[in-house]
Amino acid sequence: MSIKALITGITGMVGSHLADFLLENTDWEVYGVCRWRSPLDNVSHLLNRANKEDRLYFEYADLNDEMSLIKVIKEIKPKYVFHLAAQSYPQTSFTAPIDTLNTNILGTCRLLEAIHLEMENDLDYKPIIHVCASSEVFGKIPAEKKPETGIHEECPFHPASPYAISKVGTDLLGRYYAEAYGMTVMTTRMFTHTGPRRGDVFHESTFAKQIAMIEAGLIEPKVLVGNLKSLRTYADVRDAVRAYYMLVTINPIAGEYYNIGGSYTCEVGDTLNTLISYSTMKDKIEIEVDPQRLRPIDADLQVPDCKKFKMHTGWEPNISFGKTMQDLLDYWRERVAKKETFLIR
C-alpha cells in the first residue's frame, strides 16, 4: 500500500515547495488540503498532475470547519501530516486578531482532534504529525537577554503580535496532544524562510516585487520599506521543506519541538541592499520608509540556535543567501514579464 502524506496549506509558498519535494524525492501519494477559494498560483505547475491523479490530489477542507477535517482524515488516513496552513502574516494579525487566533489556534485544535478521533476509531492508525509553529513565538527578546549562541528551544516565549500569540497556542497544542494522547506530534519553530512564491506582504518579497516593477518601468524608482534595523537569520524555503521531511522520517519523537533556521544573519536593510545590488536600476533606486509597514511591536532579534534539530537529523542548510535572493527577484521578474497586475504593497 502506498504511503500517504497530507499537507494542509498546500497552496502556500511552503506547502507548494513541500509538494514539489515529496513528489520528486519519494514515491508517496501527496494529498493537499486547500479551501475551495484558495488561489492556485503556487501550484499551477502541478495542476496537470493533479488532474491525472498522478500521486497528487487536492482535498477541499477548512481549518474553521471541523466536519470537513474529520472527513478528510477518515477518508485518507495519511501516515504523515504536515500542518502548514495558517493565517501567516504578522502585520494582518494586528487588524484581524480574532480571525488569526481562530484559524491558527482553534484550527490546529480541530485538525488534531480529527486525527485523534480517527485514532480512537482505528487503533491501528498511528500517523506522524508535524505542527508548524513559528520563531515569532519568542518575540521581542532584548539584546542583553539573547543567548550568545542564538535563540534556543528553552528560551521563554514573549510574543509580539496576535499572530505570534496564535503560534504559541499552536505550539502548545501540538505538545499537548502528544503528551495527553500518545500521538506522534512534533512542533517546529522555523525562523525566516523565503524564496520563489513568497507572498508579497513579507519584507524581502515586497522589496523584490517593487524592484522588478521598477525595472519594468511600472512604478517610480522608489522602494517603500518598514523597519530596516530588524535582525533576521534567513533560510531558503527549499531547505526548509527538506528539514520538514527529515523531521518526520528520521526517528520521530512524540512531543519534541525544534528551532530550525538558516545560517545567514543580517539586518533587513542589508537584505534590501543585496536585492538592489542585483538590479539593473541599482544606481537609481531610492528608499522611503512607509509608516504603514511598521509594526506596533517588532520581533527584531530573530537569530536561532538550531543545534538540537541538526544533531537529531543531520540537516544543514545548503542554499546560499545570495541564491535565495536572486531566485526571489527572478521569480518576481517573471511574474512582471507576464503582465500581471499587482497591488502596491
Image (cartoon, grey):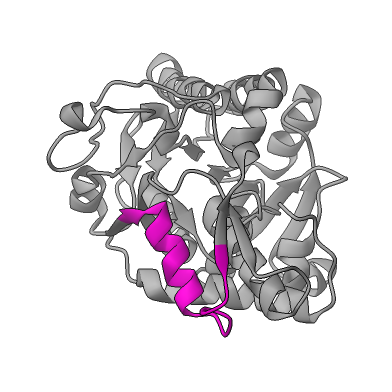
Single out the residue that lies furthest toward the left.
148
Does residue 2 show up?
no
Residue in front for this viewpoint, 301 or 13: 301
Residue in front for this viewpoint, 69 or 267: 267
Horizontal relation, residue 309 to residue 117: left or right: left
Horizontal relation, residue 187 to residue 224: left or right: left
Q: Quadrant of residue 280?
A: bottom right
Provide residue 131's location: percent of width, then percent of height: 49, 36
Provide residue 191's location: percent of width, then percent of height: 39, 46
From this view, report whether residue 101 is shown above or below residue 48.
above
Provide residue 45's location: percent of width, then percent of height: 74, 73
Residue in front for this viewpoint, 228 or 178: 228
From this view, report whether residue 337 is shown above or below residue 175.
below
Q: Quadrant of residue 61?
A: top right
Whether 283 is among the magenta residues is yes
Q: Quadrant of residue 27?
A: bottom right
Horizontal relation, residue 132 to residue 139: left or right: right
Single out the residue that lies furthest toward the top.
180
Residue in front for this viewpoint, 271 or 58: 271
Highlighted range, magenta: 266-286
Count all numbered tags in the image, as a single digit.
Answer: 0
Looking at the image, which residue is at 38% across and 61% down? 270
Looking at the image, which residue is at 41% across and 56% down? 269
